[in-house]
Image (tube, grey):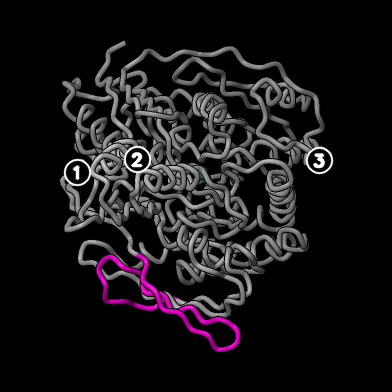
Amino acid sequence: MTTLLDTTIPRALDTIVAHFSNVRRGPVEIWLFEDEAARRDAERRLAAAGVQATIRSAYKPLVHAFLEEIGTEGLERVTVSMPNHPDGSAPRFRSEAYPLAGLLRGVFLQFEDGDQPLNYGLTLEYGGGRTERRAVFTPNRVRTDHLGQQVLAPCGWLRAGGTDEPLETEFEAAFWQAMAAIQAHAWPANPPYFDTLEIRVDTGGIERPLPFHDECLSTREALHEDFYFSLLELFQKRSGLAAGDRSLRPGQIIPDMRAATGPTRVHVALKPATVAAEKPADTAPLETAATPLEPARIRAELTALGGEKFAARSRQGRSVDGIHIAGSLPGLLITAGQHANETSGVVGALRAAPLLKQRPGINFALIAPENPDGYALHIRLREHHPRHMHHAARYTALGDDLYHRTTLPLYESEAKLEALRRTGALFHLNLHGYPAHEWTRPLTGYLPRGFGLWSIPKGFFLIVRHRPGLGDAAEKFLQELTRRLIQSAELRTFNESQLAAYRTHAGEVPFPVYNSIPCQIVETEVPLVPLTLITEYPDETIYGDAFRLAHTTQMRTVLEAADLYFNGLAQLVSETFQKQGHGTGV
Ligand SMILES: [Zn+2]
């Protein structure tokens, strides 16, 4: 193990309480990345020392103002004028107000451009004609980030006497100190740079579930996300790749955030990869699965399907398992868990497979999960934070996105190539998910860079990637598929609710919505398979009934899409593919 940083950072709240208890001057206003209980407790301690203090959340201050300070009884209409800062865009502040549209049910909510750099302006209209106006301060400072870019980032703040300025908190210091230590390390010339880079932070903060779908305000989750994506950006730059290039193979980045009290401990180290023992397979019915499946259960389900087994090896030596049910019908490939923190597709595929198998002549291959190293990391990270999205488990242990791997060694990718050799599939059902609650990067400007479209859930949606010549077929296919899927009233209600909140905070979905299901159609020279359907269910972090609706929707999509494929689509895809001189095999 090589330690890059091992340090302890004082808790800003403790420093502040000690300081003002001594100087006994007030009133004072403070913004910190602390939960409501800790802030109220500090206010009481300061009051006991004779200091009048108001301590607010520095994270999502507008949402916290509605949760803690603004009366919503009789509220009918809210107009929010957004901060207008030269270093921060309006879409970011509108996004930061999410999920007010979901929380203020029955209240008309609208946003307009404002002229204050760091204040939201609120007009609150209540029944009986009462109107209240107030400003909500949003503490932010301009920082130079790890790429040398200027970002407007939420920060701690102190307003007391003549002081009105940013206040460095442990939340910010832990991030920037770890980033600096990693940046300063003497890395090898070429990737992979490490087996695993582990950033362990034990810290306090906010963990507050909200009563709208799976929404939850979490500073530790935000810290994980910002570490993971900022480090990818850092190593992309070091490798000479563009920011966001998914082919980078730095190694496995593991931000491991733990809840703690007192000072914040930060430990950054390079470690060899370890393969932990797996839990035994459970036998509860898949239909009612309330949590992601253990790997042993997935293997047992694949074995129970019969057919021929095939496998590849992951970077860390785990088996990437597939089965092939051979028959005379056109080939079909089903995969799940390319992004291993998207778990409902695995259950959905395993539920669909035995039903598909009943179709005479069926010829399909199923691989689940495609990324077992990521899947194992997801299990490890969920032990401490089951409701965090854990994007570090999304990519492989090499650090790349599996489908962006085009050079040797192929590791996990060999399973898909084998499935295509066996089936000659012209249609790929690629089951995915995405965050079930808001995804933020507050340390580096709030919105997740390159993933702005994914930061707020917008219901279950579908993506078709097709070769030239299949655009009309893809559109007809999606219209019919969505017509069938939306027969589920539960799915319709869910999608319409999420889409309404999305539109208020992020604007119109930038692609067509068929039958309450957004559908993106992308024409591309897809390698290997001419037609791919990607499912996107907001499934990261959900359990219980929400998880059951997710995997039931994945299963229904597999069955309905396969039905449409065997009833006309396969013929069309095959003809188009052959006309383009590709032949039918792979
Ligand atoms: Zn995905």
In the image, which is nearer the foreground, mark 2 or mark 3? Answer: 2
Q: Which region shows up in magenta?
A: 111-136
Residue in the picture at 51% in, 18% down: 313
Mark 1–mark 2 CB contact (< 8 Å): no
Give SS at disc 3. helix
User: Dot 3: few (<14), some (14–19), or many (≥20) neighbours within 10 Å?
Assistant: few
Where's residue 503, x and y in %? 51, 70
User: Against 34, is 66 above or below?
Assistant: below
Give SS at disc 1. loop
- One can see residue 88 in this view: yes
User: Against 192, is 291 above or below?
Assistant: below
In the displayed structure, does residue 60 sit left or right of residue 118? right
- Whether residue 129 is in magenta: the answer is yes
Q: Nearer the viewer, residue 385 or 233?
A: 385
Where's residue 256, x and y in %? 43, 28
Three-letter residue code for mark 1: Leu
Give SS at disc 2. helix
Residue in the picture at 30% in, 57% down: 27
- Mark 1 / mark 3, whichever is N-terminal: 1
Q: Nearer the viewer, residue 447 or 464?
A: 447
Where does label 1 land, which residue?
147
Q: CA distance from mark 1 to mark 2?
A: 30 Å
Where does label 2 land, which residue?
13
- Whether residue 511 is in magenta: the answer is no
Q: Which mark is residue 355?
A: 3
Q: CA distance from mark 2 to mark 3?
A: 57 Å
- Mark 2 / mark 3, whichever is N-terminal: 2
Three-letter residue code for mark 2: Leu
Q: Nearer the viewer, residue 407 or 111?
A: 111
